[in-house]
Image (tube, grey):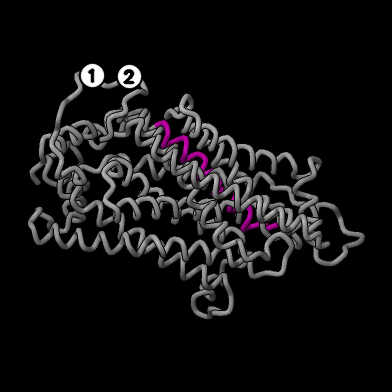
Protein backbone atom coordinates (compact mmCIF):
# COMPACT_ATOMS: atom_id res chain seq x y z
CA UNK A 1 0.00 0.00 0.00
CA UNK A 2 1.43 3.34 -1.05
CA UNK A 3 0.97 6.21 1.41
CA UNK A 4 1.03 9.94 0.82
CA UNK A 5 3.20 12.19 2.97
CA UNK A 6 0.46 12.99 5.49
CA UNK A 7 -0.46 9.31 5.90
CA UNK A 8 3.21 8.43 6.32
CA UNK A 9 3.56 10.98 9.09
CA UNK A 10 0.53 9.60 10.90
CA UNK A 11 1.79 6.05 10.55
CA UNK A 12 5.32 6.81 11.74
CA UNK A 13 3.86 8.63 14.74
CA UNK A 14 1.94 5.53 15.79
CA UNK A 15 4.35 2.81 14.60
CA UNK A 16 6.14 2.46 17.99
CA UNK A 17 2.79 1.85 19.70
CA UNK A 18 2.16 -1.22 17.53
CA UNK A 19 5.71 -2.52 17.53
CA UNK A 20 6.36 -2.32 21.28
CA UNK A 21 4.29 -3.32 24.28
CA UNK A 22 5.89 -0.87 26.70
CA UNK A 23 6.21 -0.97 30.48
CA UNK A 24 3.25 1.36 30.95
CA UNK A 25 1.02 -0.88 28.83
CA UNK A 26 2.15 -3.95 30.79
CA UNK A 27 1.52 -2.16 34.09
CA UNK A 28 -2.02 -1.16 33.17
CA UNK A 29 -2.77 -4.55 31.64
CA UNK A 30 -1.71 -6.35 34.82
CA UNK A 31 -3.69 -3.89 36.95
CA UNK A 32 -6.85 -4.49 34.91
CA UNK A 33 -6.27 -8.25 34.90
CA UNK A 34 -6.11 -8.29 38.70
CA UNK A 35 -9.56 -6.70 38.82
CA UNK A 36 -10.83 -9.26 36.29
CA UNK A 37 -9.42 -12.09 38.44
CA UNK A 38 -11.12 -10.66 41.52
CA UNK A 39 -14.36 -10.49 39.53
CA UNK A 40 -13.85 -14.13 38.48
CA UNK A 41 -13.56 -15.16 42.13
CA UNK A 42 -16.72 -13.20 42.97
CA UNK A 43 -18.53 -14.91 40.09
CA UNK A 44 -17.39 -18.31 41.39
CA UNK A 45 -18.85 -17.51 44.81
CA UNK A 46 -22.11 -16.35 43.27
CA UNK A 47 -22.47 -19.55 41.25
CA UNK A 48 -21.33 -21.88 44.05
CA UNK A 49 -23.24 -20.28 46.94
CA UNK A 50 -26.08 -18.60 45.06
CA UNK A 51 -27.52 -15.12 44.86
CA UNK A 52 -27.54 -14.89 48.64
CA UNK A 53 -24.01 -13.46 48.36
CA UNK A 54 -25.51 -10.48 46.54
CA UNK A 55 -27.94 -7.85 47.76
CA UNK A 56 -30.66 -9.04 45.38
CA UNK A 57 -33.74 -10.53 47.04
CA UNK A 58 -37.36 -11.37 46.24
CA UNK A 59 -38.34 -7.72 45.85
CA UNK A 60 -35.21 -6.11 44.48
CA UNK A 61 -34.35 -8.78 41.95
CA UNK A 62 -32.21 -6.34 39.94
CA UNK A 63 -29.48 -4.03 41.16
CA UNK A 64 -26.00 -3.05 40.03
CA UNK A 65 -25.92 -5.65 37.28
CA UNK A 66 -28.87 -4.26 35.36
CA UNK A 67 -27.66 -0.68 35.89
CA UNK A 68 -24.32 -1.74 34.38
CA UNK A 69 -26.05 -3.54 31.51
CA UNK A 70 -28.08 -0.46 30.55
CA UNK A 71 -25.02 1.77 30.96
CA UNK A 72 -22.65 -0.24 28.75
CA UNK A 73 -25.24 -0.92 26.08
CA UNK A 74 -26.14 2.78 26.17
CA UNK A 75 -22.62 4.12 25.64
CA UNK A 76 -22.15 1.75 22.72
CA UNK A 77 -24.96 3.48 20.84
CA UNK A 78 -23.25 6.84 20.91
CA UNK A 79 -20.25 5.39 19.10
CA UNK A 80 -22.52 3.88 16.45
CA UNK A 81 -24.72 6.95 16.01
CA UNK A 82 -21.87 9.50 16.02
CA UNK A 83 -19.58 7.51 13.72
CA UNK A 84 -22.48 6.52 11.46
CA UNK A 85 -23.93 10.01 11.07
CA UNK A 86 -20.55 11.69 10.62
CA UNK A 87 -19.61 9.08 8.02
CA UNK A 88 -22.86 9.52 6.10
CA UNK A 89 -22.47 13.32 6.11
CA UNK A 90 -18.77 13.02 5.22
CA UNK A 91 -17.78 15.49 7.95
CA UNK A 92 -14.07 16.22 7.56
CA UNK A 93 -13.20 16.50 11.27
CA UNK A 94 -14.63 13.05 11.99
CA UNK A 95 -11.56 11.26 10.60
CA UNK A 96 -9.28 11.20 13.70
CA UNK A 97 -12.09 10.25 16.12
CA UNK A 98 -14.18 7.81 14.13
CA UNK A 99 -12.13 4.72 15.08
CA UNK A 100 -12.36 5.47 18.80
CA UNK A 101 -16.13 5.78 18.44
CA UNK A 102 -16.35 2.47 16.57
CA UNK A 103 -14.18 0.74 19.19
CA UNK A 104 -16.43 2.01 21.99
CA UNK A 105 -19.42 0.56 20.14
CA UNK A 106 -18.00 -2.96 19.78
CA UNK A 107 -16.31 -3.26 23.19
CA UNK A 108 -19.31 -1.92 25.12
CA UNK A 109 -21.69 -4.24 23.30
CA UNK A 110 -19.46 -7.19 24.25
CA UNK A 111 -19.38 -6.32 27.95
CA UNK A 112 -22.94 -5.10 28.54
CA UNK A 113 -24.84 -8.38 27.98
CA UNK A 114 -22.53 -10.22 30.40
CA UNK A 115 -24.17 -8.37 33.28
CA UNK A 116 -27.52 -9.83 32.23
CA UNK A 117 -26.04 -13.31 32.69
CA UNK A 118 -24.99 -12.39 36.22
CA UNK A 119 -28.67 -11.88 37.12
CA UNK A 120 -29.70 -15.31 35.96
CA UNK A 121 -30.04 -17.89 38.72
CA UNK A 122 -30.05 -20.89 36.38
CA UNK A 123 -27.33 -20.45 33.79
CA UNK A 124 -27.82 -24.09 32.79
CA UNK A 125 -31.14 -23.04 31.22
CA UNK A 126 -29.74 -20.10 29.28
CA UNK A 127 -30.01 -21.93 25.97
CA UNK A 128 -33.78 -22.15 26.44
CA UNK A 129 -33.93 -18.45 25.64
CA UNK A 130 -32.86 -19.26 22.08
CA UNK A 131 -34.53 -22.65 21.67
CA UNK A 132 -37.89 -21.72 23.16
CA UNK A 133 -38.19 -17.93 22.94
CA UNK A 134 -41.45 -16.22 23.86
CA UNK A 135 -42.04 -13.62 21.20
CA UNK A 136 -44.49 -11.83 23.51
CA UNK A 137 -41.65 -10.96 25.89
CA UNK A 138 -39.70 -7.69 25.48
CA UNK A 139 -36.66 -9.53 26.92
CA UNK A 140 -36.72 -11.86 23.89
CA UNK A 141 -36.93 -8.83 21.62
CA UNK A 142 -33.88 -7.42 23.38
CA UNK A 143 -31.81 -10.57 22.90
CA UNK A 144 -32.35 -10.62 19.15
CA UNK A 145 -32.00 -6.85 18.82
CA UNK A 146 -28.67 -6.73 20.67
CA UNK A 147 -27.37 -9.74 18.74
CA UNK A 148 -28.21 -8.07 15.43
CA UNK A 149 -26.75 -4.76 16.57
CA UNK A 150 -23.49 -6.36 17.73
CA UNK A 151 -23.09 -8.18 14.41
CA UNK A 152 -23.66 -4.96 12.48
CA UNK A 153 -21.21 -3.05 14.69
CA UNK A 154 -18.44 -5.61 14.18
CA UNK A 155 -18.95 -5.53 10.40
CA UNK A 156 -18.92 -1.72 10.39
CA UNK A 157 -15.65 -1.62 12.38
CA UNK A 158 -14.04 -4.32 10.25
CA UNK A 159 -14.89 -2.57 6.98
CA UNK A 160 -13.21 0.57 8.33
CA UNK A 161 -10.11 -1.44 9.30
CA UNK A 162 -9.46 -3.41 6.09
CA UNK A 163 -7.42 -0.66 4.42
CA UNK A 164 -5.33 -0.12 7.55
CA UNK A 165 -4.71 -3.87 7.87
CA UNK A 166 -3.29 -3.75 4.35
CA UNK A 167 -1.02 -0.86 5.38
CA UNK A 168 0.26 -2.81 8.41
CA UNK A 169 0.78 -5.88 6.21
CA UNK A 170 3.03 -4.00 3.77
CA UNK A 171 4.85 -1.77 6.27
CA UNK A 172 7.52 -4.28 7.39
CA UNK A 173 6.76 -3.72 11.05
CA UNK A 174 9.01 -5.12 13.77
CA UNK A 175 6.33 -7.47 15.07
CA UNK A 176 5.99 -11.25 15.66
CA UNK A 177 5.31 -13.46 12.64
CA UNK A 178 1.89 -14.51 13.90
CA UNK A 179 0.82 -10.87 14.06
CA UNK A 180 2.10 -10.22 10.54
CA UNK A 181 0.18 -13.27 9.28
CA UNK A 182 -2.92 -12.06 11.08
CA UNK A 183 -2.71 -8.67 9.37
CA UNK A 184 -2.34 -10.46 6.03
CA UNK A 185 -5.40 -12.59 6.75
CA UNK A 186 -7.55 -9.66 7.90
CA UNK A 187 -6.54 -7.52 4.91
CA UNK A 188 -8.28 -10.15 2.69
CA UNK A 189 -6.05 -9.37 -0.27
CA UNK A 190 -6.77 -5.64 -0.39
CA UNK A 191 -4.36 -3.85 -2.76
CA UNK A 192 -6.04 -0.50 -3.25
CA UNK A 193 -7.52 -1.14 -6.68
CA UNK A 194 -10.40 1.01 -7.87
CA UNK A 195 -12.78 -1.94 -7.73
CA UNK A 196 -11.79 -2.77 -4.13
CA UNK A 197 -12.12 0.85 -3.05
CA UNK A 198 -15.57 1.06 -4.60
CA UNK A 199 -16.79 -2.12 -2.89
CA UNK A 200 -15.53 -1.04 0.53
CA UNK A 201 -16.98 2.44 0.12
CA UNK A 202 -20.41 1.13 -0.86
CA UNK A 203 -20.39 -1.48 1.92
CA UNK A 204 -19.32 1.05 4.55
CA UNK A 205 -21.95 3.55 3.46
CA UNK A 206 -24.67 0.89 3.63
CA UNK A 207 -23.58 -0.20 7.11
CA UNK A 208 -23.48 3.41 8.29
CA UNK A 209 -27.05 3.90 7.04
CA UNK A 210 -28.17 0.68 8.74
CA UNK A 211 -26.33 1.11 12.06
CA UNK A 212 -27.89 4.46 13.03
CA UNK A 213 -31.57 3.41 13.00
CA UNK A 214 -30.58 0.00 14.36
CA UNK A 215 -28.97 1.63 17.40
CA UNK A 216 -32.09 3.71 18.03
CA UNK A 217 -34.38 0.69 17.66
CA UNK A 218 -32.29 -1.51 19.97
CA UNK A 219 -32.23 0.95 22.85
CA UNK A 220 -35.93 1.62 22.39
CA UNK A 221 -36.52 -2.12 22.76
CA UNK A 222 -34.38 -2.08 25.91
CA UNK A 223 -36.51 0.72 27.35
CA UNK A 224 -39.69 -1.29 26.67
CA UNK A 225 -38.54 -3.92 29.19
CA UNK A 226 -39.29 -1.24 31.76
CA UNK A 227 -41.94 0.85 30.02
CA UNK A 228 -44.24 -2.12 29.32
CA UNK A 229 -44.44 -3.23 32.95
CA UNK A 230 -47.08 -1.82 35.28
CA UNK A 231 -44.61 -0.61 37.88
CA UNK A 232 -44.40 2.89 39.34
CA UNK A 233 -41.54 4.84 37.82
CA UNK A 234 -41.30 2.52 34.80
CA UNK A 235 -44.67 2.50 33.05
CA UNK A 236 -44.10 5.54 30.86
CA UNK A 237 -44.50 6.26 27.17
CA UNK A 238 -41.51 8.62 27.28
CA UNK A 239 -39.02 5.89 28.18
CA UNK A 240 -38.15 5.05 24.54
CA UNK A 241 -36.78 8.46 23.45
CA UNK A 242 -35.59 9.11 27.03
CA UNK A 243 -33.36 6.02 26.99
CA UNK A 244 -32.08 6.68 23.48
CA UNK A 245 -31.14 10.29 24.26
CA UNK A 246 -29.49 9.33 27.58
CA UNK A 247 -27.51 6.60 25.82
CA UNK A 248 -26.13 8.91 23.13
CA UNK A 249 -25.46 11.58 25.75
CA UNK A 250 -23.44 9.34 28.08
CA UNK A 251 -21.67 7.70 25.13
CA UNK A 252 -20.54 11.11 23.87
CA UNK A 253 -18.99 11.71 27.28
CA UNK A 254 -17.13 8.39 27.13
CA UNK A 255 -15.88 9.26 23.63
CA UNK A 256 -14.53 12.59 24.87
CA UNK A 257 -12.80 10.88 27.81
CA UNK A 258 -11.24 8.26 25.53
CA UNK A 259 -9.97 10.98 23.20
CA UNK A 260 -8.44 12.86 26.12
CA UNK A 261 -6.65 9.74 27.42
CA UNK A 262 -5.31 8.67 24.02
CA UNK A 263 -4.23 12.21 23.18
CA UNK A 264 -2.12 12.50 26.31
CA UNK A 265 -0.89 8.92 26.44
CA UNK A 266 0.29 8.75 22.81
CA UNK A 267 0.90 12.48 22.28
CA UNK A 268 -1.68 12.84 19.52
CA UNK A 269 -2.24 16.58 19.98
CA UNK A 270 -1.65 17.21 16.27
CA UNK A 271 -4.55 14.96 15.31
CA UNK A 272 -6.99 15.01 18.25
CA UNK A 273 -7.06 18.79 18.42
CA UNK A 274 -8.95 21.25 20.59
CA UNK A 275 -11.48 21.66 17.82
CA UNK A 276 -12.51 18.01 18.08
CA UNK A 277 -13.19 18.45 21.80
CA UNK A 278 -15.12 21.65 21.21
CA UNK A 279 -17.29 20.15 18.45
CA UNK A 280 -18.08 17.10 20.57
CA UNK A 281 -18.66 19.47 23.48
CA UNK A 282 -21.33 21.24 21.42
CA UNK A 283 -22.96 17.89 20.70
CA UNK A 284 -22.82 17.04 24.41
CA UNK A 285 -24.35 20.40 25.34
CA UNK A 286 -27.28 19.95 22.94
CA UNK A 287 -27.87 16.39 24.11
CA UNK A 288 -27.62 17.52 27.74
CA UNK A 289 -30.27 20.18 27.22
CA UNK A 290 -32.58 17.64 25.56
CA UNK A 291 -31.93 15.08 28.28
CA UNK A 292 -32.68 17.72 30.92
CA UNK A 293 -36.03 18.45 29.28
CA UNK A 294 -37.00 14.77 29.26
CA UNK A 295 -35.95 14.39 32.91
CA UNK A 296 -37.99 17.41 33.99
CA UNK A 297 -41.02 16.25 32.00
CA UNK A 298 -40.83 12.70 33.38
CA UNK A 299 -40.66 13.64 37.06
CA UNK A 300 -43.04 16.59 36.78
CA UNK A 301 -45.86 14.45 35.39
CA UNK A 302 -45.32 11.72 38.00
CA UNK A 303 -45.18 14.22 40.86
CA UNK A 304 -48.16 16.27 39.70
CA UNK A 305 -50.39 13.23 39.07
CA UNK A 306 -49.90 12.16 42.72
CA UNK A 307 -50.82 8.53 42.11
CA UNK A 308 -50.12 6.47 45.21
CA UNK A 309 -47.53 4.11 43.77
CA UNK A 310 -45.74 6.81 41.77
CA UNK A 311 -45.76 9.11 44.81
CA UNK A 312 -43.94 6.47 46.86
CA UNK A 313 -41.17 6.22 44.26
CA UNK A 314 -40.95 10.01 43.90
CA UNK A 315 -40.72 10.39 47.68
CA UNK A 316 -37.79 7.96 47.79
CA UNK A 317 -35.97 9.76 44.97
CA UNK A 318 -36.54 13.27 46.32
CA UNK A 319 -35.94 12.49 50.01
CA UNK A 320 -32.34 13.38 51.08
CA UNK A 321 -32.50 10.62 53.70
CA UNK A 322 -32.99 8.04 50.94
CA UNK A 323 -31.89 8.80 47.36
CA UNK A 324 -32.21 12.59 47.31
CA UNK A 325 -28.48 13.31 47.22
CA UNK A 326 -27.95 10.82 44.41
CA UNK A 327 -30.80 12.45 42.48
CA UNK A 328 -29.30 15.91 43.07
CA UNK A 329 -25.86 14.79 41.85
CA UNK A 330 -27.29 13.02 38.78
CA UNK A 331 -29.05 16.19 37.66
CA UNK A 332 -26.46 18.76 38.72
CA UNK A 333 -23.45 17.01 37.19
CA UNK A 334 -25.41 15.10 34.58
CA UNK A 335 -27.22 18.11 33.09
CA UNK A 336 -26.33 21.57 34.39
CA UNK A 337 -22.55 21.42 34.81
CA UNK A 338 -21.71 19.98 31.35
CA UNK A 339 -24.03 22.46 29.61
CA UNK A 340 -22.56 25.42 31.54
CA UNK A 341 -18.94 24.37 30.93
CA UNK A 342 -19.43 24.08 27.17
CA UNK A 343 -21.56 27.24 26.98
CA UNK A 344 -18.90 29.46 28.62
CA UNK A 345 -15.97 30.26 26.26
CA UNK A 346 -13.45 30.39 29.13
CA UNK A 347 -14.15 26.77 30.17
CA UNK A 348 -14.68 25.47 26.64
CA UNK A 349 -11.29 23.74 26.62
CA UNK A 350 -10.29 20.05 26.35
CA UNK A 351 -9.39 19.58 30.02
CA UNK A 352 -12.60 21.17 31.31
CA UNK A 353 -14.76 19.37 28.75
CA UNK A 354 -13.14 16.01 29.58
CA UNK A 355 -13.59 16.62 33.33
CA UNK A 356 -17.24 17.55 32.82
CA UNK A 357 -17.66 14.41 30.72
CA UNK A 358 -16.25 12.25 33.52
CA UNK A 359 -18.68 13.59 36.12
CA UNK A 360 -21.53 13.45 33.60
CA UNK A 361 -20.89 9.78 32.78
CA UNK A 362 -20.84 8.94 36.49
CA UNK A 363 -24.09 10.88 36.95
CA UNK A 364 -25.74 8.98 34.09
CA UNK A 365 -24.73 5.67 35.69
CA UNK A 366 -26.31 6.83 38.97
CA UNK A 367 -29.42 7.75 36.99
CA UNK A 368 -29.68 4.17 35.71
CA UNK A 369 -29.41 2.98 39.30
CA UNK A 370 -32.19 5.36 40.36
CA UNK A 371 -34.44 4.07 37.61
CA UNK A 372 -34.14 0.50 38.86
CA UNK A 373 -33.71 0.30 42.63
CA UNK A 374 -36.25 2.78 44.11
CA UNK A 375 -38.98 1.25 41.95
CA UNK A 376 -38.20 -2.29 43.07
CA UNK A 377 -38.07 -1.13 46.69
CA UNK A 378 -41.69 0.06 46.34
CA UNK A 379 -43.82 -3.13 46.54
CA UNK A 380 -47.17 -3.11 44.79
CA UNK A 381 -48.84 -4.73 47.82
CA UNK A 382 -48.41 -3.77 51.51
CA UNK A 383 -45.78 -5.89 53.25
CA UNK A 384 -45.78 -6.69 56.95
CA UNK A 385 -43.36 -8.56 59.22
CA UNK A 386 -40.66 -8.56 56.56
CA UNK A 387 -37.00 -7.98 57.33
CA UNK A 388 -35.68 -4.65 56.11
CA UNK A 389 -32.88 -6.26 54.07
CA UNK A 390 -35.56 -7.96 51.95
CA UNK A 391 -37.06 -4.61 51.02
CA UNK A 392 -34.01 -2.33 51.09
CA UNK A 393 -31.33 -3.09 48.49
CA UNK A 394 -27.67 -2.81 49.39
CA UNK A 395 -25.02 -4.07 46.98
CA UNK A 396 -22.43 -6.47 48.39
CA UNK A 397 -18.72 -6.64 47.64
CA UNK A 398 -19.44 -9.45 45.16
CA UNK A 399 -21.57 -7.12 43.02
CA UNK A 400 -19.05 -4.30 43.27
CA UNK A 401 -16.18 -6.66 42.39
CA UNK A 402 -17.99 -7.83 39.26
CA UNK A 403 -18.88 -4.23 38.39
CA UNK A 404 -15.26 -3.08 38.58
CA UNK A 405 -14.20 -6.24 36.72
CA UNK A 406 -16.49 -5.17 33.87
CA UNK A 407 -15.01 -1.67 33.85
CA UNK A 408 -11.48 -3.14 33.97
CA UNK A 409 -12.33 -5.42 31.04
CA UNK A 410 -13.49 -2.36 29.08
CA UNK A 411 -10.16 -0.58 29.70
CA UNK A 412 -8.16 -3.76 29.06
CA UNK A 413 -9.76 -4.20 25.65
CA UNK A 414 -8.90 -0.62 24.74
CA UNK A 415 -5.31 -1.07 25.92
CA UNK A 416 -4.86 -4.19 23.82
CA UNK A 417 -6.65 -2.82 20.73
CA UNK A 418 -4.43 0.27 20.77
CA UNK A 419 -1.41 -2.07 20.52
CA UNK A 420 -2.89 -3.86 17.55
CA UNK A 421 -4.31 -1.05 15.38
CA UNK A 422 -3.54 2.65 15.10
CA UNK A 423 -5.94 4.88 17.02
CA UNK A 424 -5.84 7.48 14.26
CA UNK A 425 -7.05 5.70 11.09
CA UNK A 426 -4.42 6.09 8.39
CA UNK A 427 -6.58 5.17 5.42
CA UNK A 428 -9.06 7.99 6.17
CA UNK A 429 -6.45 10.53 5.02
CA UNK A 430 -5.81 9.06 1.57
CA UNK A 431 -7.01 12.27 -0.10
CA UNK A 432 -5.10 14.67 2.15
CA UNK A 433 -1.50 15.71 1.62
CA UNK A 434 0.80 16.76 4.40
CA UNK A 435 1.05 20.53 4.72
CA UNK A 436 3.57 21.00 7.44
CA UNK A 437 5.39 18.89 9.97
CA UNK A 438 5.78 20.38 13.47
CA UNK A 439 9.33 20.47 14.70
CA UNK A 440 8.39 19.24 18.18
CA UNK A 441 5.34 17.71 19.78
CA UNK A 442 3.00 20.40 21.10
CA UNK A 443 3.18 20.63 24.87
CA UNK A 444 0.09 22.75 25.41
CA UNK A 445 -3.64 22.26 24.97
CA UNK A 446 -4.02 25.15 22.55
CA UNK A 447 -3.59 23.42 19.19
CA UNK A 448 -6.83 24.12 17.34
CA UNK A 449 -5.92 23.04 13.80
CA UNK A 450 -8.25 20.18 12.83
CA UNK A 451 -6.52 17.01 11.61
- Residue range corresponding to the magenta coloring: 27-52
Nearest the eye: 408 or 75: 75
Q: Could you classify mark 1 by the number of other residues whose Cα lies within 10 Å: few (under 14), some (14-19), or many (20 or more)?
A: few
The image shows residue 80 at horizontal and vertical percentages of 39, 54
> Which residue lies at the image location 21% right of the left edge and 62% below the top edge?
202
Residue underneath mark 1:
440
Dividing the picture into quarters, in which one does residue 158 lie? bottom left
Q: CA gap, disc 2 to disc 1?
A: 9 Å
Whether the residues at callouts 2 and 1 have beta carbons within 8 Å, the answer is yes
Q: Is residue 80 above or below residue 138?
A: above
Residue 441 visible in the picture: yes
Dividing the picture into quarters, in which one does residue 382 lie? bottom right
> Which residue lies at the image location 40% right of the left edge and 33% below the top edge?
260
**435 to the left or right of 272:** left
The image shows residue 281 at horizontal and vertical percentages of 44, 38
The answer to whether residue 36 is magenta is: yes
Q: Could you classify mark 2 by the number of other residues whose Cα lies within 10 Å: few (under 14), some (14-19), or many (20 or more)?
A: few
Nearest the eye: 435 or 228: 435
Secondary structure beneath label 1 = loop
Residue underneath mark 2:
443
Residue 421 visible in the picture: no
Which circle marks residue 234 in the picture?
none
Amino acid sequence: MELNKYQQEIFEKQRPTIEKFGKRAWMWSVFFLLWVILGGYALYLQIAVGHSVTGMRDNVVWGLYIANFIFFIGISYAGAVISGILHILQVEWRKPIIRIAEMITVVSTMIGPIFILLCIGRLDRLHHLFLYPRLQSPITWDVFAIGTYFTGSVIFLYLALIKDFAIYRDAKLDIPKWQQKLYKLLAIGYRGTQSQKKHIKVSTNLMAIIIVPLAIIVHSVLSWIFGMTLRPGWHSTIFGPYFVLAAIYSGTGVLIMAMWVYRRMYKLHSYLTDKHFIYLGYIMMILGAGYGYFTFSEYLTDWFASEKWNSEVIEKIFNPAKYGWYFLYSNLFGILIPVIIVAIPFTRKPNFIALASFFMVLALWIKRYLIIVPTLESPLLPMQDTRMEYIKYSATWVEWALTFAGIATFFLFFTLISKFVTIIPISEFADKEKKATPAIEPSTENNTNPA
